[in-house]
Image (cartoon, rainbow, N blue to C red):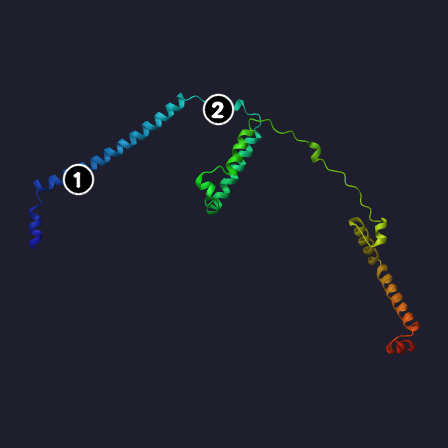
Amino acid sequence: MAYDKVLAKYLKHDVLIAKVKRELYKDYAALEQQGHVARHTAESERDEKKRAMKTRNHQPLNNRGVVNEDAYYKHLAYSGMLEKTRREAPKGALDKVELAAGFHEFDQFYQGELLDDAKRPARAIDEELYKPRHRPATEGTSDAVATGFLDTAGRREQFLADLDRYGEKGLEQAERTELYYVLEQFFENSRQSPAAPEGDKQLNEV
């Protein structure tokens, strides 16, 4: 209570007016400083526009020297690809010593070459290189079949022939006939061989 009474003595006009003036001065100084910054920014923008109007535009001169516009599109595509790759993997791209030190890496060199290519005539395209070439016909019914070798066409012909025979159940019958023939030869050989095992002799007697 005593402390409040002491403070109440200072709640007077002559004591508070100095404090109010000081705070108002600070607010006015901050407001004036922000006004200076805003005016300086506006003046800078106007100066840049005036300087741009006074600066000579060299773009028409550069355009007159362009003979290969495709090089500019290649440059845009390549630089866009680099930007996308570095944005998706910033660590892998920015960890390179060449990029950090600003060395002349291949990426920068190639972009410069693409810009220079715009001033160079485009290379002639030989359309003959892109025409479909005649491929020699591969005969599957050649004498290579007799040696046990079949090329791609031969394997296809053999597959289609086997498929037709299977569909007609002719191949199944042919394989059964070949199996019977092999068994017939086996039994005949066992019967004529004097050194046939005992089991084969009993089988021949049956």
Q: Position of residue 104 (x, y in %)?
A: 49, 37
The amino acid on which the numbered mark 1 sits, given as a three-letter code, is Glu
Circle 2 sits on which residue?
59
Q: Is residue 10 left or right of residue 111?
A: left
In this orientation, which residue lies closer to the viewer: 170 or 49?
A: 49
From this view, report whether residue 205 is shown above or below residue 116. below
Rendered image quadrant of residue 44: top left
Using the image, tell me which numbered label, if any, was put on residue 183: none
Q: Is residue 77 left or right of residue 46?
A: right
Mark 2 burial class by Cα count in 10 Å: few <14, some 14-19, many 20+: few
| Quadrant of the image occupied by residue 51 | top left
- Which residue is painted at 13% across and 41% down in the image? 19
Q: Residue 128 or 179: which is nearer the viewer? A: 128
Badge 1 crowding class, 10 Å Cα cut-off, few under 14, some 14 to 19, many 20 or more, is few
Q: In the picture shown, does residue 175 fall above or below 129?
A: below
Badge 2 amino acid: Gln
Q: Residue at x 39, y 21 (%)?
A: 54
Residue 88 position in % (x across, y down): 48, 45
How far across and how far down the image is residue 154, in percent?
A: 81, 50
Give the secondary structure at mark 2.
helix
Q: x, y (%) of residue 113?
A: 54, 32
Local secondary structure at mark 1: helix
The C terminus appears in which quarter of the rendering?
A: bottom right
Query: Which residue extends farthest right?
Result: 192
Q: Nearer the viewer, mark 1 or mark 2?
A: 2
Q: Which residue is mark 1?
A: 23
* Mark positioned earlier in the residue sequence (1 or 2): 1
